[in-house]
Amino acid sequence: MTVFIGALLILWGVFILYSSSLRMKKEEFKDKGVIGASGYIEMEFLFRLLSRVPYGVIKGFVLLIGTSFITLGTYILSSHIVV
């Protein structure tokens, strides 16, 4: 089970890095929705607030998250395979 979780974390981190570096455009970071439309006012307010942060900061934060998932998955795999 530990091997599965470690491999899943590594794959998830790779997917985040791929999506962040190749697929996400500058326009996708801007929130254009109306607050209160979906019913999750807290999340909509948070995304509206985060859309004011510069593009490079958001991209760097997403890259950091992807890298940390890969690091955590590697740590879990290495701690399980210790001989």
Image: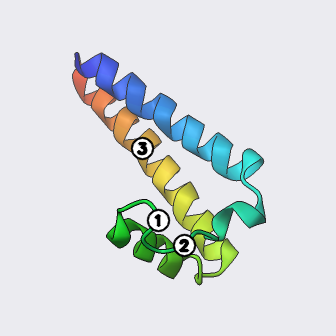
Return the mark for residue 5.
none
Q: Residues within 10 Å of mark 3 (few under 14, many from 20)?
A: many
Q: Which residue is drawn at 46% across and 40% down?
A: 70
Q: How crowded is mark 1: few (under 14 residues within 10 Å), some or many (20 or more)?
A: few
Q: Residue at x 43, y 50 (%)?
A: 68
The residue wearing badge 1 is: 37
Mark 3 and 1 residues: CB-CB less than 8 Å, in contact? Answer: no
* Relative to 49, 83 lies left or right: left
**Is 74 above or below relative to 35?**
above
Q: Residues within 10 Å of mark 2 (few under 14, many from 20)?
A: few
Instruction: Give residue 71's quadrant in the image.
Output: top left
Give coordinates of residue 25: x percent, y percent.
77, 58
Label 2 element class: loop
Give coordinates of residue 3: x percent, y percent.
30, 18
* Relative to 79, 39 lies left or right: right
Q: Which residue is drawn at 68% across and 74% down?
A: 55
Q: Residue at x 56, y 44 (%)?
A: 16
Mark 2 and 1 residues: CB-CB less than 8 Å, in contact? Answer: yes
**Is 43 above or below relative to 4?**
below
The residue wearing badge 2 is: 34
Instruction: Give residue 4's quadrant in the image.
Output: top left
Q: Earlier in the sequence, mark 2 or mark 3?
A: 2
**Is 64 above or below relative to 79?**
below
Give coordinates of residue 28: x percent, y percent.
69, 60
